[in-house]
Amino acid sequence: MALACMLLLLAGSAMCQIQEKILHAFEDGSVLSGNLMFDSAGNIYGTADQGGATGNGSVYELSPGPAGVWNFNVLYSFTGGDDGSDPVAGLVMDGNGDLYGTTSAGGAYGSGTVFELVPSLPGQWSESVLYSFGGYPGDGAMAESGLVLDAAGNLYGTTGEGGSTNCTGGCGTVYELTSSGNGQWSESVLYSFLGGDDGYNPVYSGVVFDGQGNLYGTTAAGGSSGCHHSGCGTVYELTPSQSGGWTENILHTFNGRDGFTPESGVVFDSLGNLYGTTEEGGTAACNTGSGGCGTVFRLSAKESGGWSLLVLHQFGGSSVGDGANPVGSLTFDQRGRLYGTTSNGGVTGSDFGSVFQLKRSGTKVVEAVFGNFGGAAGEHPNAGVILDSAGNVLSTTFSSASDGGVVFELTK
């Protein structure tokens, strides 16, 4: 299927052709929000929220076969009991080939889990729950973000709720899971958001490490009193202390004009700058939602201390052939170009979403928008993208006309 591509650079535009290939279309009600991942053999792994054998979600694998065909295999279907349900986020893999992820519901207390999948017999995987969140107050709840592994094999993530009692249902947490080496894992809450200037509701963002062991992420709300009266959101840093605690430092508080509701988290470039998106906000006119269609931003550390934010792009929505409302994470290619998705907007005016690319051209930032989603091609891509060795773009859509999301590939 050919997709329209529009290059936006001030006045003027150019068109190109992009081919979309559907690698798998779900027809069981599965919705797809989490990032895909490759293993070293080129297999793709992902999670499906809802759907599966019992309607509580699944973990799946796509393996490349002859003649460009991809073989689909369900590794595990959640039951909705102690094993968890509704895996929203993507997966991470350790050096042994074991997979780790989160569920936003289910578990021993109904507040979500962290799980591990280990290959057993050929084509079969066994699931074990590493931790069941206890909910509100105190512990985390609603784990909708992905995990990161440190060099010691510890797991880090965020919960959108739980923790502090300052917010209804809790303001959210950043947590660590540490293995004792005998199959037992213990959770430590590194930071409980308080719902004020420190932000709250980290939702899908997760955290990333820098080279010094500090953690970075975003909160979708808090930080200021504007933006629907819940705050516009923040970018934060957590720094470990010698005593074992962690200290939060707010790098930026959004004000609406530079974006609000940053749900996707942040990524580093090779120079130590942070990049992310906001689902709403900006000053560009927007035909979907209120208060702007969202932004792409860069945060750079200043020599004098602190960080400065630069808005790289403001989405304008399908009325100008642009995307709107990015919620997925960003990805760099080897040439330093940024890729992401928008849940709405697009080239054709259908508002079913887009894939975008940002690159530097002299002193300007050029955006390429790949659109024409809708129907069997999938609708509303919420996840970030991954790139294969040839530079092809792969991601998922939340839904489609086939009663489920799709896994797709874009090639030139």
Image (tube, grey):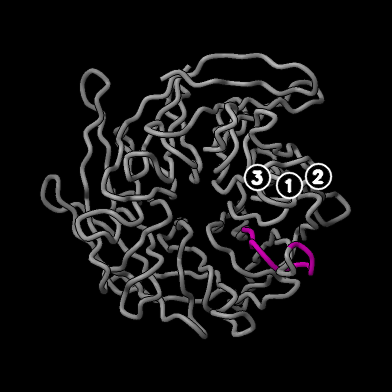
Q: Image height check: is 89 above or below 394?
A: below
Residue stretch rendered in magenta on the structure: 217-227
Residue 346: image x %, image y %? Answer: 58, 32
Q: In the image, is 283 to the left or to the right of 389?
A: right
The local crowd at label 3, few if under 14, some if 14 to 19, many if 20 or more residues have their Cα within 10 Å, is some
Residue 170: image x %, image y %? Answer: 56, 79
Which residue position is annotated with label 1?
A: 292
| Rendering quarter of residue 182 | bottom left
| Nearest to the observer: residue 182 or residue 4 | 4
Q: Image height check: is 240 above or below 403?
A: below
| Nearest to the observer: residue 47 or residue 376 | 376
Marks 2 and 1 close (CB-CB < 8 Å): yes
Amino acid of disc 1: Gly
Mark 3 or mark 2: whose residue is earlier in sequence? 2
Amino acid of disc 3: Thr
Tell me the residue at 85%/49% (across/down).
303
Q: What secondary structure characterizes most of the magenta part?
A: loop
Question: Real-space Cα distance between discs 3 and 2?
Answer: 13 Å
Does the magenta-highlighted stretch encompass residue 226? Answer: yes
Tell me the residue at 42%/24% (across/down).
20
Q: What element carries label 1?
A: loop
Q: In the image, is 350 to the left or to the right of 179?
A: right
Give the number of the mark in front: 1 or 3. 3
Q: Image height check: is 368 above or below 17?
A: below
Which residue position is annotated with label 2?
A: 283
| Rendering quarter of residue 225 | bottom right
Which residue position is annotated with label 3?
A: 288
